[in-house]
Image: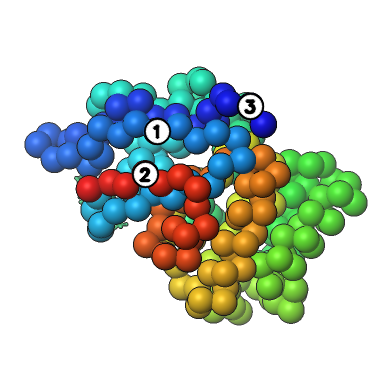
Amino acid sequence: MTNFPVLAADGATVTLDDTTLLAPTTFAVLPGEFWCVTGSNGSGKTTLLRAFLGSRSLTAGSCSVRGEPVDMAKPRHRRLVASLVEPIPVARDMTLREQVTLVAASWYGNAPEAAERAERVIERLGLPALGERFPHQVSSGQLQLFSLALTLVRPADAVLLDEPERHLDSHRVGLVATLLAERARKGTAFLVATHEPALVEACEGRVELG
Ligand SMILES: Nc1ncnc2c1ncn2[C@@H]1O[C@H](COP(=O)(O)OP(=O)(O)OP(=O)(O)O)[C@@H](O)[C@H]1O
């Protein structure tokens, strides 16, 4: 793996009037590294992730993806970065399996490979028995796992997650931590805002805010 960062922040700062949303922050995440963003409520974790998605503008400093300024209008950037920061819209009239397969097919083409990838992520997140259900027929934790499946089935050099532990019991947090660490070993860079000790323990780099 190269030493060229996938995600880099250099003095990234967000202020709004007199309020500091994100204090100056500098770090770099290399390919295959799993980093956590930690800090108390309101310390700027979501703001930092949004800066990497271009949905929150910086007032000073920079955030870059593979050395380029963040610009999600570019198809190349959308292919580089997968995220679960904002809620992912779901279709009420499609089953969980159909939706994960559709997302896989939109990136990998309508080939057996797409269905296989979808099935693999569904399995790893413990969702096979729920594959034929519709979104309104599952619990909050199961919906969270479904959103993670929609995110992780995509190809991406970098994955941004905001509190992936939401609604999950400790067993499911463990499944997620194992899956993320495994994918990181294959070269994906992770930046994960979290309050969950099991995820912090699994990470190799940490941005501490606040
Ligand atoms: N639109 C806004 N206008 C003013 N302040 C805002 C706005 N959005 C967020 N903030 C403030 O920015 C700071 C950082 O918010 P952010 O959501 O990034 O925190 P966080 O670390 O993700 O918090 P949590 O752990 O509670 O999810 C907070 O103090 C918040 O009140």
Answer with the quarter of the image where residue 190 lies. top right
Q: Residue at 42% across / 65% down in the picture?
A: 197
Disc 3 target residue: 2
User: Between marks 3 and 1, how big is the CA–CA gap?
Assistant: 16 Å
For label 1, the crowd category at 10 Å Cα-Cα, with few meaning under 14, some 14 to 19 and many 20 or more, is: some
Any part of residue 194 in sight: yes
Image marks 3 and 2: residues in contact by CB distance under 8 Å: no
Q: Is residue 110 above or below residue 40?
A: above
Disc 2 target residue: 207
Q: Quick one: label 3 or label 1, which is nearer the N terminus? A: 3
Give the image location of residue 67, x and y in percent.
51, 21
Quarter of the figure that contains the N terminus: top right
Image marks 3 and 1: residues in contact by CB distance under 8 Å: no
Q: Is residue 35 above or below residue 176?
A: above
Q: Quick one: label 1 or label 2, which is nearer the N terminus? A: 1
Image marks 1 and 2: residues in contact by CB distance under 8 Å: yes
User: Between marks 3 and 2, how big is the CA–CA gap?
Assistant: 21 Å
Answer with the quarter of the image where residue 10 lies. top left
Left or right for 140, reference 127? left
Left or right for 186, reference 199? right
Kind of residue at badge 1: Phe
For label 2, the crowd category at 10 Å Cα-Cα, with few meaning under 14, some 14 to 19 and many 20 or more, is: some
Mark drawn on residue 27:
1
Give the image location of residue 167, x and y in percent.
46, 73
Give the image location of residue 82, x and y in percent.
58, 43
Q: Residue at 74% across / 79% down in the picture?
A: 129
For label 3, the crowd category at 10 Å Cα-Cα, with few meaning under 14, some 14 to 19 and many 20 or more, is: few
